[in-house]
Image (spheres, rainbow, N blue to C red):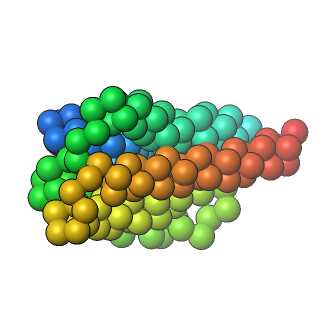
C-alpha cells in the first residue's frame, strides 16, 4: 500500500511537469507511475484472493502495463507536430526525483522479487523498469542540455519506456496464463 501511495503521489508531480515542459519521456513515465500505483493497489487487494482470481488480476495488470506505451504514442504524435525539446534541467531533476521514489519503492518490494506469481512478477518488473527509465530520463536531459538541443533524446527515451512496458505486459500475461491453466 505504501508503494501504491508513493507512486500515485509522484505520478501527479511528474504529470504536471511533463505537460509544462512538453516531455514525451516524462509523460510516459508519469503514466508508468500511475500504472505502478494501480498495479500495487491491485496486488495489495488481490493477495487475499483465490489463485484463480489472482490469475485474472494478473491478466488485468498486463493490460494496465500498456498505459505508458499509449501515453508515449500520444505525446510523440504531438512532438512531431511541434518539434521542441523539453526544458532539460527540469527534465533531469524530475527524473532524479522519480529515481529516488522508485529506488525507495524497490527497496520495499525487494522481499518479493523472487516470487513466481504474476502479481509479484508485475511488481518486480515495474520496479526494474522504473529505475532504468529514470536513469535514461536524467541522461536525456543532460544530452539535451549539453550536446543536442533537440526533442529526439526525449523521444528516444520515451520509446524505450513504451517498449519496456510492452515487454513487461507480455511477461505478466504469460505468467497469469500459466497460473490460470494450473488452477484450471
Residue closest to the eye, 31 or 121: 31
The quarter holding residue 51 reads top right
Q: Residue at x 20, y 47 (%)?
A: 86
Residue 48 is left or right of residue 82, and the answer is: right
Residue 174 in sight: yes
Q: Residue at x 74, y 38 (%)?
A: 52
Residue closest to the eye, 40 or 170: 170
Residue 51 is left or right of residue 148, and the answer is: right
Q: How many marks?
A: 0
Where does residue 33 sit, x and y in percent of width and height?
35, 45
Where does residue 30 sit, x and y in percent of width and height?
31, 43
The quarter holding residue 110 reads bottom left
Q: Residue at x 42, y 54 (%)?
A: 156
* Relative height, residue 34 to residue 137 (above, below): above
Residue closest to the eye, 123 or 156: 156
Where does residue 68 sit, x and y in percent of width and height?
44, 41
Q: Residue at x 59, y 57 (%)?
A: 121
* Relative height, residue 164 to residue 169 (above, below): below
Amino acid at each position: 500500500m505504501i508503494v501504491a501511495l508513493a507512486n500515485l503521489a509522484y505520478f501527479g508531480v511528474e504529470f504536471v511537469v511533463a505537460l509544462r515542459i512538453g516531455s514525451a519521456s516524462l509523460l510516459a513515465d508519469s503514466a508508468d507511475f500511475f500504472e505502478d500505483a494501480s498495479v500495487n493497489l491491485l496486488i495489495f487487494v488481490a493477495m487475499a484472493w483465490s489463485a484463480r482470481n489472482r490469475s485474472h488480476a494478473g491478466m488485468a495488470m498486463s493490460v494496465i502495463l500498456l498505459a505508458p506505451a499509449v501515453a508515449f504514442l500520444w505525446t510523440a504524435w504531438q512532438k512531431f507536430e511541434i518539434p521542441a525539446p523539453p526544458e532539460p534541467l527540469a527534465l533531469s531533476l524530475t527524473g532524479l526525483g522519480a529515481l529516488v521514489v522508485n529506488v525507495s519503492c524497490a527497496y520495499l518490494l525487494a522481499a518479493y522479487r523472487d516470487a513466481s506469481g504474476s502479481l509479484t512478477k508485475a511488481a518486480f518488473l515495474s520496479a526494474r523498469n522504473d529505475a532504468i527509465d529514470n536513469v535514461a530520463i536524467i541522461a536525456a536531459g543532460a544530452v539535451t542540455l549539453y550536446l543536442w538541443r533537440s526533442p529526439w533524446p526525449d523521444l528516444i527515451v520515451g520509446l524505450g519506456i513504451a517498449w519496456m512496458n510492452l515487454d513487461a505486459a507480455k511477461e505478466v500475461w504469460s505468467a497469469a496464463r500459466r497460473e490460470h491453466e494450473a488452477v484450471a
